[in-house]
Structures are given as structure tokens and as C-alpha cells.
Amino acid sequence: MIPAIIILSMLLRLLTFAVVMNYYKVSRFRTAWILIAAGMILLALENLFQLLAMAGVSTLATGTFIPHAAGLAVSLLMLSGTALINTILKRLDSVERNKKNIERRFQLLFNTSSDQLFVLSTDGKIAEVNQSACERLGMERNELLDKHFADIKASPASEGVMDHVSTIRTNGMHIFETDLRNKSGKRFPVEINCRLIEIDEKPFITCVARNISERKELDKKVRIAIIETEETERRRFAKEIHDGLGPLLSTIKLYVNELDGMESGSHERTEFIDYINKLVNEAVDTARNIANNITPKILSDYGLLRATNTFVDVINATNLLKITTSFQNVERNIGPTMELIFYRIITELINNTIKHANAANISIELRQADNKLIFEYKDDGIGFDLEKAIEKGDNHMGVKNIISRVRSMNGVFNFRNTLPGVQISITTDVNPTKV
């Protein structure tokens, strides 16, 4: 019976050795496992010596010294191994506490953020959501968890969400604008900044949704102000044509009609033709004056610098974007015509940036060097292809108007996509020969 118990004990110790060696292979803390494994081998050897002694085999190993020495070694090895494991466990406990503290801090930041935060799985389902998002959507956290993100969009379409997910997985990040819908069905616009992350070695998507209702409202007000300004200018232009050019053209028509009843070569007919020529010349001069002199009052009263800065201040006050201006050595002697042309170019470019470029910053610089005017305009928007716009006759960016104005001054127009944004430069003589 006793030999069987000893054999079983030896087998269990060898099995423990095998288990310990398995931990040794996968553990980062190998020293402790080596010490314990060595102790298990010595204990198994002790069992072997006991069996040999019971079998009557007399060797130094079966005496009293070796077993006692083995027992002492085992005690030391097990003590060292246990001490090491205790140290490791304390370290792991400290790491775990730090991890929990980090998680608590993250959760605090997550839930106290004024932005709406979502964590999505790669199939578009909501895995986590913060308090701000719950309040804005009018839903409880448990109502939102596992709901597809398309379900809270103003126009539910899971395909559209998955297109965004595909872009995020490809590029690692993605920013887009959309409308969300709260529990009562009310829509509100948001800008969503998404990034691909890993949690427990699994891919997830963090989404920061920022309410842009105010920005959209300001954008709308700026657009309305621009449209109203343009409409006012159109009415002024129409009035100038009606009051200034209309009577001349009507008179020319009357004279032309009278010519039909006059004898060819007669003195009266010759006088009528002279009158018509004078009226045509006057009409041409009037048309030129109308084109050149429909000028904003602030421009005619205070000049290009003051007029531009006043226009820029109105835009900057909306906080829709930031415009900076720099005028160096620009004198009033450049003339009212050139001031008007540059004012129209500047306002046209700003208008186009607001409407189409989605930019945050605009830089405007105009400087006079000797007899040259150098104008530079930069924005950090999405840019566009100038050649394609001209090829297609696409005038939505006002490109043709701007180039036409530059040519009227015999100026040089340069365009460059800077990614992000565009850079436009214009160089012209201060007193061009053709305007």
C-alpha cells in the first residue's frame, strides 16, 4: 500500500512539473515557474529514493543525507518561487488598480463631455454612448445600446452608414456632416469626427458628434446677407440702365425709324445719321460709366482698404470663418476703377469660399511695389480643379468673372491648389493702359 502511495505522489509531482512548464512557456514571469518546477523534480526524486530504499537498494541517495538535502533544496526553491509569485501578484494587482483608475477617469471624461460621444462596432451598431448623447437624443443608454447608428439618423439608411464605416476602416479616420433625429423626431445637424481604435484587440469606431445648429444658422444668415447685397446691386444696376441707357436707346430707335421715310442722300437724312452716331457714342460712354461707376458708397468715400476691412469685419463677426487682411503701401492713387475691380474680386472670392470651399481661414494680401500691384488670396478649403471648371464652362466658382476682371486690367492671373485650399495671385500695373 505504501509503495503505491509513493508512486502516486511521484506521478502527481511530475504532473505538476508538466503543468508548471506549460505556464513557463506562456508566462512573462519565468523565473518563479523555473524555481517551482525544479522543486517538483526534487520532490519526485525524493519519492524515487524512498522506493529504492524500500526495495533494499542501498546507495548514498537512499541514505539520510541526500533526502534531507533534497528536502532543504525543495523548501528553498518553493519559498523563492512563492515569494516571486507574491511579488508578481502584487504587481498585477497594482496594474489592475491603475487600469481601473484609468477606466474611471475615461468614463468620467466620456460622460461629462459636452459633445455627443459614440463607440460603434464595425457593423455600425452602438456599443457605448455618453450622457450628453443620451440627453440630446432624448433616450436612455440602454435604449441606444445595440441600436444601429442609421436608426438615429434623420434619414435612416444603413447603406450610407456602412459607406462611412468603410471609409473609416480604409483611412483610419473620417469627418462628415449629417442630421440626427431625437426620440420625438426633431432633426438637428451635427459634424461627426470618427476614428478607428482597438479595444481588447477588436476594432471599434469612436464618433464625436458636435452640434452645428448655430454654425448652420450663421451660415444661412451670411448667405442671405450676400444674396440680399447682390440683389440690391442688381436693382441698382437695372435702375442705372433704365434711367441712363434706356432713354438714349429709345431716342436712337426713333431716329432710325424716321430714316425710313427720308430720301437717300438728303441733307436731313445726313443730319439724322450724325445725330444717331452721336447718340450711339453717348450710349457707349453711358454703358461704360454704368459698368465702372456702380460702386459701393464706402468704396467711393473711403477707398479699397476701408471697404474691404468693413466687409471682412461683417463676415468675421459671424465666427463662421476667420479672415485676415494685409495692405502694404497701397495708395488711393491706384484710381477708383482699379479699386472697384479689386473690391469685386475680393468679395467674389470670399463669397465663393463661403459657399463652396468649407474653409476655416482666409488670408488676403495686397501690396504695391514700384508700379505693380500684387494681390494674394489663400484659403484652407477643399479646393477645386481650375482647368476642369473652365473646360466645362462651370461658373459656379465665379472663375470666369474673376479672370475677366483681371484681363480688363491687363493683369496676370495665377491659380494653385495647395491641398488644403487654394492660392490665387494677381499681378497688374498700377495704371493699366486698358480698363
Image: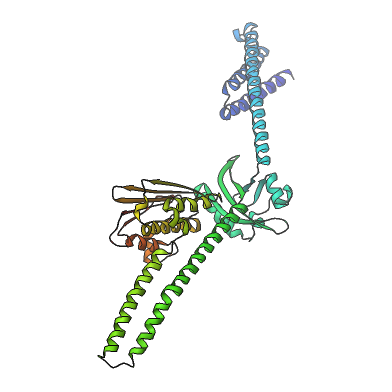
In the visual, does 275 lie left or right of 41?
left
- The answer to whether 89 is drawn above or below residue 379 in the figure is above
Residue 20 placed where, x, y %?
62, 25
**Residue 100 or residue 139, whichever sits in front:** 139
What residue sits 50% from the left and 58% below the top? 355
**Residue 196 or residue 285, whichever sits in front:** 285
Classify the position of the C terminus by image quarter: bottom left
Residue 12 placed where, x, y %?
67, 24
- The answer to whether 178 is drawn above or below residue 65 in the figure is below
**Residue 370 or residue 317, whichever sits in front:** 370
**Residue 273 or residue 81, whichever sits in front:** 273
Residue 59: tell me if it is visible.
no
Total numbered badges shown on the rendered structure: 0
User: What is the residue that sits farthest to the left in this orientation?
Assistant: 265
- The answer to whether 287 is drawn above or below residue 25 in the figure is below
Colouring chosen for the image of the structure = rainbow
Residue 335 placed where, x, y %?
35, 56
Residue 291: tell me if it is visible.
yes
Please identify the quarter of the rendering in which residue 189 is found: bottom right
Residue 225 placed where, x, y %?
55, 60
What residue sits 57% from the left and 58% below the top? 220
Please identify the quarter of the rendering in which residue 184 is found: bottom right
In the visual, does 305 lie left or right of 314?
left
Classify the position of the N terminus by image quarter: top right
